[in-house]
Image (cartoon, coloured by chain):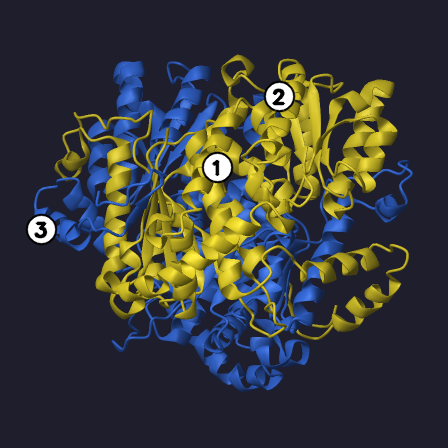
Chain colours: A yellow, B blue
Amino acid sequence: MATLTLDYANCLAERVGSHGLPAQTLTDAAPRLAELTRRLNQTKGTGWERWRLLPFDPMRREHVSAVKKLVGKLRTPTNDLIVLGIGGSALGNSAVHAALTPATYNLMPRKQRGGPRLFVLDNIDPHLVRETLDEVRRTDPKFKKTIVNVVSKSGETAETAAQFLVVRQMLKKALGKGYPKRIVAVTDPGKGTMREICEAEGYATLPVPEGVGGRFSVLSPVGLFSSAMCGIDVNGLLDGAAEMDQRCSEPDLMDNPAAMLALILIELTKRGKTNHVMMPYCNALLQLADWFRQLWAESLGKRQNKDGREVFAGATPIKALGATDQHSQIQLYREGPNDKVIGFVEVERFTRDLKIPRGLKVENLKYLEGATLGQLLAAEKKATEFALVESQRPNFTIRFSRLDANAVGQFIQLWEIVTAYAGLMLNIDAYDQPAVETGKVATFGLMGREGYQEWKTQVETALKPSSHVITSKGDSAPR
Amino acid sequence: MATLTLDYANCLAERVGSHGLPAQTLTDAAPRLAELTRRLNQTKGTGWERWRLLPFDPMRREHVSAVKKLVGKLRTPTNDLIVLGIGGSALGNSAVHAALTPATYNLMPRKQRGGPRLFVLDNIDPHLVRETLDEVRRTDPKFKKTIVNVVSKSGETAETAAQFLVVRQMLKKALGKGYPKRIVAVTDPGKGTMREICEAEGYATLPVPEGVGGRFSVLSPVGLFSSAMCGIDVNGLLDGAAEMDQRCSEPDLMDNPAAMLALILIELTKRGKTNHVMMPYCNALLQLADWFRQLWAESLGKRQNKDGREVFAGATPIKALGATDQHSQIQLYREGPNDKVIGFVEVERFTRDLKIPRGLKVENLKYLEGATLGQLLAAEKKATEFALVESQRPNFTIRFSRLDANAVGQFIQLWEIVTAYAGLMLNIDAYDQPAVETGKVATFGLMGREGYQEWKTQVETALKPSSHVITSKGDSAPR
């Protein structure tokens, strides 16, 4: 079983001076955090906190058995799996897949890969969609070995709906009456546009469970289906999540990594560290930073607190990659505005390391010979940590004892619980996203949806052509 | 020929109130910017500003002819091209490749692709390196159709050197005496560790030109070789860059997109907009945002200005993707701290669009039918722009008339010149990266390099084990 370790010493004043927290802050906050833990333990599983029950029976058993039943039938005959989804319906799938399959997964021969190739279509970029569909069609012209996994609670998310209309038509053309067999929908079990389509057309479905928001849904069938299709140990993910959940139910702050992370991040945010960088030293974990970006930004970026006061809360999540971004971002992180907390993620032991060979007789490179790439990566991480401390930049490390499904499950549950704490500490609603609404209705207006004409007018008035334009061809006249 | 249009109206007070710039600021700054333009026109091509000459003869002719000569010989017999490089030796290659080849490039059949598969190994992550090399070896066990393109000016960058030692050994084992024929080095033409290795072993080489820093080198052989190998129109890139360079030599601020962008971004930074988001509505352009991240962070993130005063200058570059990140970051961008400028990048017309078919009789989705994905994407972008303006969040748009090499070349030269202006306006050295040094020497110390023992001691003292650790397994004792 994997172990996750949180080391937060470099967030303290004893390491980074006035840019860190006095250790006393933690001691002083311990009773308040213990109280929040008790509160979260009570509300666990109620309202929008139902996601906390995903790793536990009976939800877990129901989901795993439904997923395994479908996967048992579909995995062997499927060569390509296309996920249609965006935001919380795509980020988790992509992140878990990247973390737990080889970087070259889609290039590997079917036999070695075990499962189908995976294409997560999380945008409506016409080139991306065409090129992906062309590639699938090239290897499977009649879509007989392709499964389309549409993920949408309501079915009305414009991007997913548009893709779905395109892909459904394509399947229908190629397969005639049999096309519904190639579609698996993860959607609301009881209501909504996608549910109605599923009933009418007869797709296999899996539930987006009631009370589980998109960005907290990766450990539901939303993320489990594509994971299981690609051979990922979904029980390992859920075991890890369950263990971490227990750990984060501990009232003692000093034993509860979620409470500690939330406390540190919120206290540092108050002190001007409003940019929160997640920087794994591991390519496979980079997309988990992307998943974190949504969780952190949508949950905490709120204009009003629960008392209706304007607070403009939140911090900006940023992803970076070690060692790569040492050659891109570290100059700024050390010498630019001291407005960041850097969260390193590292893997203690890579199962497949590579030795740097001896034999090129170059004096300046001798120090590398005989070491492994993993050792060099670990040294670079430690050196960067040191360099940040020297510049008084607060940072912490989450260390995976190894990279497996259990560890990834722990990491996911950890950050979701950190988010719940942070929401309480900021006194904001971590489960809504009111600011996304304007863009949606304005899109409806621009696309000519009935009842939204007024929005089109508003957009065109607000963004009317101006003279503040420069083109590369010499004329700066209004468009 | 492509056109790039900069629309900055949404950065002005008339659109976003007190969070924007009064139009008067631009008028007032015009003489100062004209003066900076004259200065840059004078220093163009001298010192660390030699990169400005890359799109012009004689450098251009020399580079293109050397690159084409090698590519003419190597392209047809090469199935896999592995680039070893990090930071400025990798970001440009990856960005240009992503922008100008299909998303599925590496999956396509050789004939359709035209060139070799491309693997840019920009990290020492052992799994990434092993998995990539395994994949290449699977299709070409003796590396007879593989070219390794090592990119390092000095040859001493630890990550690239380590990879190089691994890959060189592998080639040597497989190919015996003939292995140097499979290596193309882009390195300093006259001196340094890699140059010595090239001379001793007899690799083909291309120059990293004198006076061109890593992050300004994409339009040199650093970026041109892998681009040409993959069939990208390198003359198109350079034509675009040359045109943009002319355009950005215009003294009139209102006609000079680089001067205007620099002015707006620096003035907004002074007013607290310290996060600069680049958000293309186009998957292919996302990696150009990654390239921009390095350019902006390393060039401007500086503790001291040229007078030696502590300034902690710079802004944090952030990449985001439209429409995808509307479902991840826009909640924060609208309601969180008003500390950002969002730079949209969009493509006016996608050459291969996709129509959303009619025929699924669902009332709520009818508005999508008959439109194209490109139209929906454009509507989403406009709607997001509107939503940001409504929340008084400054933003601008760079519009590509179409996506081709010329446009990408324009974009690259534009941002490099913006960076040069920004450096002058901040009175900092945009061409050094002093803060990266500590991490390098500390890594040497930890790796046991002779002469650096003292650094090891320093790191271990600064980061000595503390009790500020929580593990997921219940014990919070010191490590």
- Given residues B246 and B315, the one toward you in this image is B315
- Given residues A405 and B53, the one toward you in this image is A405
- Residue A68: numbered disc: 2
Q: Quadrant of residue B21?
A: bottom right
Give the labeled residue for mark 3.
B454
Q: Are marks 1 and 3 in contact (CB under 8 Å)?
A: no
Q: Is residue B383 above or below residue B130?
A: below
Number of the front mark, 2 or 3: 2
Q: Amino acid at mark 3?
A: Glu
- Name the subunit of mark 2: A
Q: Amino acid at mark 2?
A: Lys
Give the labeled residue for mark 1.
A241
Q: What is the spatial separation of the Cα atoms under label 1 and label 2, in whole angstroms?
A: 19 Å
Name which residue lies at 20% across and 40% down.
B193
- Name the subunit of mark 1: A
Q: Position of residue A233 (x, y in %)?
A: 50, 24
